[in-house]
Amino acid sequence: MKNKFLWTVTFLLVTFPFLSGADKPGNLPQKSFTSKDATLAIDAFHATFYNPEMKLYAISSDKKGRAAIWVQAIYWDMVMNAYKRTQSPKYLGLIEDIYQGGYEQYTGYDWTDEVEWFIYDDMMWWIISLGRAYEITGEAKYLAHAASGFSYVWQESYDPKRGGMWWNFKHDGKMSCINYPTVVGAMTLYNITKDPDYLEKAQNIYAWSRNVFFDSRQGRIADNMHYHFQRKDGMDIDWTTQLYNQGTFIGSAVMLYKATNDRAYLDDAILAADYVRNTMSDEKGLLPFKNGVEQGIYVAIFAQYMIRLIEDGKQPQYMDWLRDNIDTAWSNRDKVRNITFKDASKPCPTDVMESYDASGCPALMQVIPPKK
């Protein structure tokens, strides 16, 4: 009787899977993304938002406007990562095209132009990406622009009296979004040139920023600080957490760890990554997103640096979590345009979308390999 009962139950579950709840929405196993999906995603993003006449990306899918100056560097990173993943000549060509777009739109990378480059972190995102372009192609012009840009930003933004990097030309605040990218920029140039001055600058800014912005108990990164000399403590720190600040902190720490083999840097990066996964992400582990201007780009920046922790820091425990994020967003894509949305839990809107809000999933897919 027992065997007959088990046989009957098995037959019913196989024949009518709804009895187990397996076919209910949310219970179906998600299909894992593939390498072909990753290529489809970056190509769809490019087709939807790239303006070939401008050689840069538009604000939105109707091809109107020019996306913000700093996010163009992030989109360029995505193309470079697609080339590194596939070695396809089409992406190698795009690396040069986007460089030319930036050259034409941003006064030939004239860092002294305070109209185009109106804030220091905008410069540093491009400086980092120019360095990466040199690492990939060996084209001297990329390195020349990166080195001259870094020298200019350091001269204008570094505060030798109090430490750290000023955010804007008014020198009225210091933000994570300039300080940690400065570490990444310095380390990118150090890895290329082996000039110890870059390493020294990176360690200098990291130490100052860690002391000001890093919560060494929880792993969270503060957004900004302003000086208040009338107060005893002298500063006001805003502990609002931003995903891209967590990312650049992680990248800074891992690059310094790789260069120095100092385990303290790696421990910092792990703590910051755990804070994102365990505290900032939702109950399903989906990465956070915000609805402010240009803030949809944050996941794309986070992707750039989490893979460094996974690979260079040898921390594979984050891989499945990020794959789940990709699978969720990709399953909810607009299947006509094959673009995704920053809120991975919801179907992608089918009307006009901003490029910022569509960037996260394709960026992750270029650096996070699919399951084998």
Image (cartoon, rainbow, N blue to C red):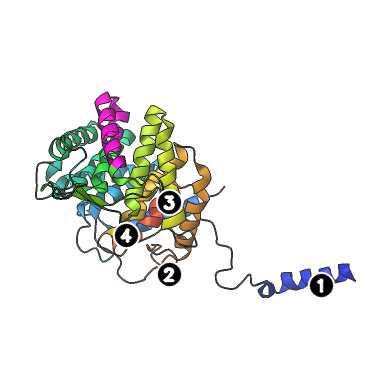
Question: What residue is at 75 percent from the left and 73 percent from the top?
Answer: 12
Q: Secondary structure at mark 4?
A: helix
Residue 264 lies in quadrant: top left
Q: Secondary structure at mark 3?
A: helix
Label 1 crowd bin: few (<14), some (14–19), many (20+), radius 10 Å: few
Question: What residue is at 23 percent from the left and 52 percent from the top?
Answer: 56
Check contact, mark 1 vs mark 3: CB within 8 A. Answer: no
The residue tagged 4 is 296
Magenta stretch: give its range.
Answer: 186-211
Q: What is the C-alpha distance between the residues marked 1 and 2?
A: 39 Å
The residue tagged 2 is 347
Q: Secondary structure at mark 2?
A: loop
The tag on residue 275 is: 3
Q: Secondary structure at mark 1?
A: helix
Q: Depth-wise, is mark 1 or mark 3 nearer the camera? A: 3
Looking at the image, residue 94 lies above or below residue 41: above
Q: Earlier in the sequence, mark 4 or mark 1?
A: 1
Whether residue 189 appears in magenta in the rendering, the answer is yes
Q: What is the C-alpha distance between the residues marked 3 and 4?
A: 20 Å
Q: Amino acid at mark 3?
A: Tyr
In percent of width and height, residue 70 lies at: 23, 50
In percent of width and height, residue 143 lies at: 23, 33
The residue tagged 1 is 8
In percent of width and height, residue 117 lies at: 14, 47
Going by the image, does 263 lie left or right of 190?
A: right
